[in-house]
Image (cartoon, rainbow, N blue to C red):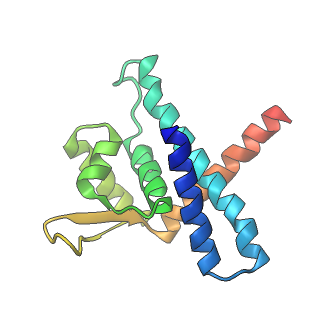
Amino acid sequence: MRTFRNELDHLMLAFDRLKNRGNSRANINNFDRVLNFYRVAKSVASMRRERSKFFADDLFGEPAWDILLDLFIASADERPISVTSACLASGVPLTTALRCLDNLVRQGLVSRSPDKQDRRRAIVSLTPKGQGAVEAWIDMANDKMGAIYA
């Protein structure tokens, strides 16, 4: 029931954001696309976490991808993510996660800015380039999965 409630809350947030941009048909069509991106990203992140039920935690390591997925989902939820939270999402030691985060910033996929409520913290978010890259990957994954089930 909690999962259903979270999904409904997200749907309402996404619909309100699109509605506030105007009542154009393009915004309604974009709603399906945005919702699909969110669902795929949540599913991929969940599958990556559940992999540890079958394999040793240290067997796979994609901390940068885990950070990107976490930031993508947080962006859809309009939830700010601190550097510490992004590092925790990576599932690797803090120093490794910070190196990955720095690399993502250098590549222009993630930006870092001071937290307006607490200057001791920094907030990280996807840049438009990072957002576009994750969305492009989701489109590609959907196409490939669709081809399998067609």
Residue 97: x and y in percent read: 28, 46
Residue 82: x and y in percent read: 27, 59
- Tell me if residue 142 can be seen: yes
Residue 13: x and y in percent read: 54, 64
Residue in the picture at 54% in, 56% down: 10
Label count reads 0
Left or right, residue 78 beside residue 102: right
Residue in the picture at 37% in, 42% down: 63
- Tell me if residue 136 can be seen: no
In the image, farthest residue toward the bottom: 22
Task: Assign the C terminus to one quadrant of the image.
Answer: top right
Q: In the picture shown, does residue 22 fall above or below 110? A: below
In the image, farthest residue toward the right: 150
Residue 108: x and y in percent read: 42, 66
Residue in the picture at 57% in, 52% down: 8
Q: In the picture shown, does residue 81 fall above or below 17? A: above
> Which is nearer the eye, 120 or 133?
120
Residue 90 lies in quadrant: top left
Residue in the picture at 17% in, 69% down: 118
Q: In the picture shown, does residue 111 fall above or below 65? A: below
Residue 20 lies in quadrant: bottom right
> Which is nearer the eye, 36 or 59?
36
